[in-house]
Image (cartoon, coloured by chain):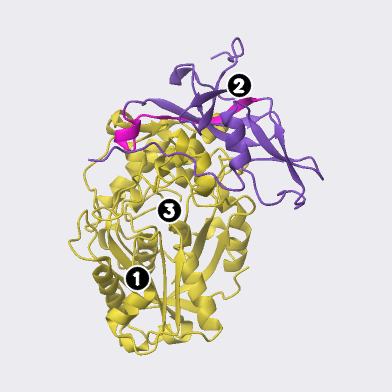
Amino acid sequence: MTTMQRPLPVQDSLSANFWKACRNHKLSLQQCSACATAQFPPGPVCKKCRSTDLQWIESTGRGTVYSWIVVRHPIPKEIYGPEVPYVVALVDLEEGPRMPTNIVGCAPEDVTAHMKVQVVFRDLTDEVSLPQFTPILGSTPNR
Amino acid sequence: MWKLRDKYAIGGIGFTKFSKASGVTVLELATEACLKACQDAGINPDEVDGMLSFNFGDSVPGMAVATAMGLPNPQFVVDYDSGGNAANLITLAATAAIEAGLAKNVLCFRAMNGRSGFRLGGSRDLSAYNVTQYTAPFGWITYPQAMAMWCRAHMVKYGLTKEQLGSVAITFRENAMLNERAMLRTPLTMDDYMNARKIVDPLGLNDICLESDGACAVLITSADRAKDMRHKPVYIMGGAYGGGMHQGEDLFDAIRWPDLSENFSKHIADDLWRSAGITPKDVDVAEIYDCFTYTVIMVLEGLGICKPGEAGAFCQEGGLKRDGLLPTNTHGGLLSEAYIHGFNHVIEAVEQLRGHSGDRQIKGAEIALTTAGAMTCGSAMILRN
């Protein structure tokens, strides 16, 4: 049996800046120069005003948990078997956009709605670092 | 808005056995269902000149089935690259094609070896291209993992409970127990449900639909032609497709969808009811796309059958049961009958409106709702007898 590889981002002309910044442990977002709207995932034009004048800005890397799941049944088992249970979340960044990620650094049971989190980077390969999020200490809402 | 109320009808239905292992090709399944639909309608297959289907790269194109059937003149043949969201859209597209003169009798089908062949519910292509590069590398890959994220948002916003979701699964299982073609007919209790294997919190095994081999087909034709066919016509009263902004770059992608406690159905509700000229109270039986228990919650609220946040209680109080306010998924649904991507819901609606549902017949059913799709885009129809 061949060893299954964890899915890695296949970078393209829209995403290369994002992943390059992640490799440098910086979270970047596309922002419209015309209307200042930040967007994620990056797109060919600003989805609000359709300007093509887009630039990259550095995010504060802070946000709040919008929704989350705890994966218990690993698919594929060969890759995620050793990692379950793990948390996938949607984090609302301070700049506005929502981003899929993992919550790390706390037990899955301790993740709560609106919990404040900040980005941390997990180096997967020489080219790819994943932006994951971890609770901001002392900020966990009352459970 | 679709404007062909009562001008088109479902003249025939056909379906294969639903199983875990058909032992035959998808082409054989599709052809069997399509020929049965012609036989059910009482027409010579030579009269079929249109083929419409949808697939995920897991089926056969309409031209292949037309060729296998030996159709003399297929002149409107379209395959949608789509999921269950298209299950009602293709029938609406058939009415548009006939209205435009592109065809006279259109077979709409969905055929798949969804358990023994390509398993949509399992791992998808793990190549993280395009928008998938922002999801799959985090281990967010399967549809149950996608829907769990939606479900949690509803729990946070409205307090939806596991017991409420469980009542959906249990009701549909009760219905499947009356349906000889259903794949799951063993009783399901709340204890069974609550103790079932956890798959991806907040969803467990019984929140997630079956994987099935099988095919379903319906023959769409004009109301006039349908009147000459074997059975009483089932008229298409209304229909709609959509989902508004932020439908995503593929069917998994809801990164930009603002509120995961509500799905596409909210966006099509007005057009659906207006196109049919009725309100939710007029519906006698509903066949709601239930790839997950939670999907039903979003559709009940989105279509205005329940107020936002109230569908969970509606289900728990028996609203979906055979003797409830809205008998729903009388065949057992995708959760307990079979997963033919929502096309089995259309078959069941037609049988109910014909009065052919046997032990599971809802007495006096005159108007049926069918829905198709779960997340950012989908379709629905109102059918009547």
The residue stretch that appears in magenta: A61-81
Q: Which residue is mark 1?
A: B217
- Chain letter, colour purple: A
Residue type at mark 2 is Gln
* The label number, if any, that marks residue A118 in the structure image: 2
The residue nearer to you, when weighing B22 against B43, is: B22
Q: Which residue is mark 3?
A: B289
Give above or below for A11 relative to B69. Answer: above
Give above or below for B249 relative to B100. Answer: above
Q: Distance from label 2 to label 3 (Cα)?
A: 38 Å
Q: Are marks 2 and 3 on the same chain?
A: no
The quadrant in which residue B233 appears is bottom left
* Mark 2 element type: strand
Q: Distance from label 2 to label 1 (Cα)?
A: 51 Å
The picture's colour for chain B is: yellow
Q: Residues within 10 Å of mark 3 (few under 14, many from 20)?
A: many
The residue nearer to you, when weighing A39 against B288, is: A39
